[in-house]
Image (cartoon, grey):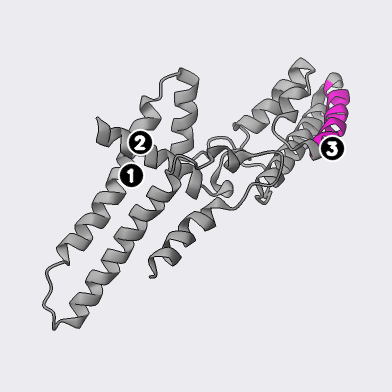
Amino acid sequence: MKARNFLLAIAVASAWGWAAPAAAHCDTLDGPVVGAAHRALETGQVEHALIWVQKADERAIREAYAKARAAHAAGGAAAERADAAFYATLVRLHRKGEGAPYTGLKPAGHVEPSIAAADSALASGQRAEVENLLVERTQAGLRKRFDAVAQKKSFAPTDVGAGRAYVGAYVDYVHYVERIYETAAPEANADAAHEHNAPAPKAATRATATPAARHGH
């Protein structure tokens, strides 16, 4: 149980530390950002949308929202176009807050398996689905690298080619463990990945580059 909990912890930390904003589902039509925009229009409460952007972008969202609400009340094709424009504005500014580029709205269904599992677990209130996915993924990555270096460990001292193959596998294995260990540190701030008071730091680059420099490979 302790080993499983440890693997879960490092898997979750890795998900925050290595996540690339571009891989998120916030720009899909069935993602949470567009869902929030839809709720804002349906309920008349712009706050549903405002929580997805930085404070500096509130004015732009309120203006886009007002235009959409005005057209939305009339219905028809004009309302659909206005809704789509509001969705795009909210997603674009949300992406800007994450430090990610906006490349347009994506069709529904374009969601990474990990994110789908995370949302499903949150909706059901049961974390087992996402927990199992993360633990299995982390175990598989560790097992692959450990086995690769273990198989190359016994090489003849005079066989430089085999020695280099061992070193390559060893470096890959150690860096994998080190990256996970660093991102799983208790003081790591997972909220920084989606901080909306300032552009999010590019944690993915820092998390992967720092261990390599520290280990000297």
The residue stretch that appears in magenta? 57-72
- Mark 3 lies on residue: 60
Of labels 2 and 3, earlier in sequence is 2
Residue at 73 percent of width and 34 percent of height: 87
Give the SS element for disc 2: helix
Foreground: disc 1 or disc 2: 2
Whether residue 121 appears in magenta in the rendering, the answer is: no
Crowding at dot 1, Cα within 10 Å, few <14 / some 14-19 / many 20+, comes out as some
The residue wearing badge 1 is 138
C-alpha span from label 2 to label 3: 40 Å
Q: Report the quarter where the N terminus lies.
A: top left
Residue 14 spot, x, y in % from top left: 43, 45
Mark sitting earlier along the chain (1/2):
2
Q: Is residue 121 left or right of residue 171?
A: right
Given contact means CB atoms under 8 Å apart, are the residues at marks 2 and 3 in contact? no
Does 140 sit left or right of 114 as displayed? left
